[in-house]
Amino acid sequence: MTAGGRAEGAEPDALRPASRGARVLSALFYGACSFLLVLLNKALLTTYGFPSPIVLGIGQMAATIMILYVSKLNKIIHFPDFDKKIPVKLFPLPLLYVGNHLSGLSGTSKLSLPMFTVLRKFTIPLTLLLETIVLGKQYSLGIVASVFAIILGAFIAAGSDLAFNLEGYIIVFLNDIFTAANGVYTKQKMDPKELGKYGVLFYNACFMIIPTLIISVSTGDLQQATEFNQWKNVLFVMQFLLSCFLGFLLMYSTVLCSYYNSALTTAVVGAIKNVSVAYIGMLVGGDYIFSLLNFIGLNICMAGGLRYSFLTLSSQLKPKQPVDEENTPPGFEALESGAECRLGAQGGHS
């Protein structure tokens, strides 16, 4: 970014399309952040029994605001100062952002990791449908067949879930809808000449942290969190703070992956990550109840997701495949060389 405050799209290098290295590394960065955060949030909300997913979400929003604002003050990054047109430019992203954030945290606490990850795979067909409607994209028969396998496996697994939790299922399906819509509309709204990826992140968090805090106070959620008996436990506090920081990294990596690739690619990388989470979740967490039919459904769903991921990513990485006509943000060479994305002193995929 330029220290002089030029728009992100004004750099000559920004006219170049994103390279294959930038696309792949941004996708891997998102997958790693998402994987670590799911396991960490599961430990906080289930193992420790932290009663407030909303307060955890507020902590992650606060970390995002502080990191981006300090980075802007130190001219490490640039995004526009606030004006009255920004809410109009962003809408409906802030609502989708907070809905995605809080429903994801709540779903993690309600279901076992294998069932949570299987149900999260409905994000893929929802994203495909929204990209077809909103962005006018079309997909091959092979991709549609893979989606059918994902849905079939998810229904088999859900139908034989011995730890069925209706509230958890509803929350995760809402999370799927919010995730798909958030990815598609982030791609649509993220014009580098206007807000850019940093502005989208910063103003999403700013607009929603106060309403979320009000909800937390009015529902008694904040009081439960302040009265939680583990605040003197140093290990818990360290994991809580790490979750807040990783929450920011996930938001940043989600936007970065959508910026270099597409909303569908972001959803596909999330699905690949979920394969690892699902099988690890059978061994950790203590809330998965094994049944043969459920296990078969899990594997059908995972196989469909992996096949779908292979088809989508191999298609996008073909050298002659048209790339998104997004301006490449300056500084992506650091990504290509394997270095962490520079954002102040922190590396950095939500």
Image (cartoon, grey):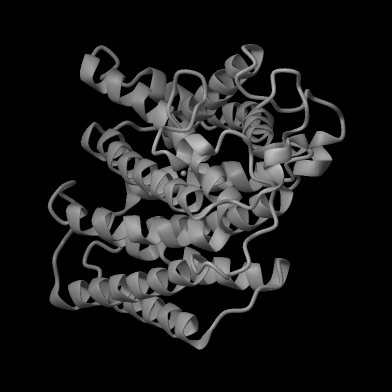
Residue occupying image coordinates x 71% and y 46%: 15
| Viewer-side residue, 98 vs 196 | 196
Q: How many marks?
A: 0
Residue 95 rendering spot, x and y as whole percentages:
66, 44
Residue occupying image coordinates x 34% and y 50%: 110
| Viewer-side residue, 84 vs 322 | 322
* Quadrant assignment for the N terminus: top right
Above or below: residue 304 compared with residue 192: below
Quarter where residue 323 is shown: bottom right
Q: Residue furthest right?
A: 84
- 214 displayed left or right of 112: right
Residue occupying image coordinates x 63% and y 48%: 96
Quarter where residue 51 is shown: top left
Q: Report if residue 302 is visible in the image.
A: yes
Q: Report if residue 112 is visible in the image.
A: no
Residue occupying image coordinates x 48% and y 29%: 60
- 282 displayed left or right of 145: left
- 173 displayed left or right of 136: left
Above or below: residue 226 compared with residue 99: above
Residue 245 rendering spot, x and y as whole percentages:
42, 26
Residue 73 rendering spot, x and y as whole percentages:
65, 12
Residue 273 rendering spot, x and y as whole percentages:
33, 55
Quarter where residue 228 is shown: top left
